[in-house]
Image (tube, rainbow, N blue to C red):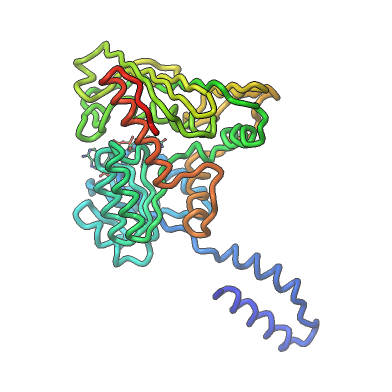
Amino acid sequence: MKTRRIFLQKAGLSALALNLTPFNPIAAMTKEIFSEKQDEQPLRVAIMGLGSYGTRVARAMKDCKRAKLVGVISGTPSKIEAWQKEYAIPAKNCYNYETYHQIKDNPDIDAVYVITPNGLHMEHTLGVAKSGKHVICEKPMAVNSNEGKIMVDACNAAGVKLLIGYRMHFEAKTQEVVKMRMNGDFGKILFFQGLSGFIIGDPSQWRLNYELSGGGAMMDIGIYSINGARYMIGEEPIWVTAQETKNNPEKFKEGIDETIQFQLGFPGGAVASCLSTYSMNNLDKFFVNGLKGFAEMQPSTGYGPIEGKTHKGPLTNPHVTHQTTQMDEMAAIILDGKKPLVPVDGEEGLKDMVIIDAIYEAVKTGKKVNLV
Ligand code: NDP
């Protein structure tokens, strides 16, 4: 509105002052829209947890048009110093885990992106929501559905948005396949296969510490197959079965799943057959099969480029750094209320957590778990 007023004032004044050409409302409007886009305030983001993924997001944000990295929350002073230099972050936008609640008094930060270990997501999301800032939280949103529900409720109560870092929901080839599914190009879908895994290294890392991870491969990488099954099939599963294999109980202690095979049943009759593991590489593949066609993606969820084909031919959409698109799109969701093709809100994250809870229950009991 400010831009509009200033522009109209300027346009009116110059036309009057120069008295050369009559005021042209259409030209004025075009110029106005242009100048509004130029002046658009970006989503001003602080990243919490300056680890390996936080660093990737920050670098990708350098190319963002609507999101801007303006602050940090970190327990490591040397990282804060380095990030201040690299991203021109002012000292007043730097916090640690004891001081970040003061962010509520900082009008220059709109949202905090929580990129800490899974077991801290709930505490950190609640803290940020209490400070009145929007939350973007990494996947898995929490370590179980109870926590996820508390997070959704807390953000609703605080009147802030909660988005989950599902970068694939904005990836062009993935969106292409989702749009084909929505168009009915695959016909009735009856099968999905999701393979998600890698060989995990250092046994002392937080991903293998139950307190901080909340589980093993399923929380970290298996979630991609769960989430992918849902957006590729376009339905919510109604039952779950699962089987665990543990070859290295030394490395994968109680509560840390090494390999789980699981199956999800969908109301339309489709079945998803998936593998989640910390003990095998070369597993990053989605295959969806309908009565009229198929899509196959490999790699399907890595940092890209994603590759794939459908019964109509290869997927050719250009690769853009996932986190750049994600952050620009999330800015549009938060600032403009834009509706994404596939949801990324807290409710979406919660759906995956409910399924993960059911998978762990199915592993423990050896029984089929109904979700409805
Ligand atoms: P890292 O271990 O590399 O970084 C986590 C950071 O969290 C640390 O560097 C530290 O930053 C901060 N932290 C705060 N408390 C602790 C603690 N008790 N122990 C360890 N670190 C702590 O992990 P990642 O960056 O790989 O993963 C972080 C989150 O991002 C996870 O939830 C993970 O699932 C998600 N992720 C998502 C990906 C995606 O593609 N969407 C890819 C990779 C990860 P500081 O020193 O600044 O406090």
- Please state if 210 lies on the left or on the right of 49 as rendered: left
Picture quadrant where residue 156 is located: bottom left
The residue at 19%/22% (across/down) is: 254
Is 301 drawn above or below residue 339 in the view shown? above
- Spot the residue most to the top: 247
Instruction: Find residue 44 and report its horizontal and vertical position in percent.
Output: 42, 58
Q: Nearer the viewer, residue 324 or 86?
A: 324
Q: Quadrant of ligand 1?
A: top left
Q: Is residue 292 visible in this depiction of the protein?
A: yes
In this rendering, position of residue 14 left or right of residue 146: right
Q: Residue at x 30, y 13 (%)?
A: 245
Q: Is residue 264 left or right of residue 1?
A: left
Residue 372 in the image, given as x and y percentages of width and height: 39, 34
Height in image: 348 above or below 19? above
Quadrant showing the N terminus: bottom right
Residue 215: horizontal and vertical position, in percent?
27, 28
The residue shown at (22%, 25%) is 255
Residue 23's place in the image compared with 254, above or below, is below
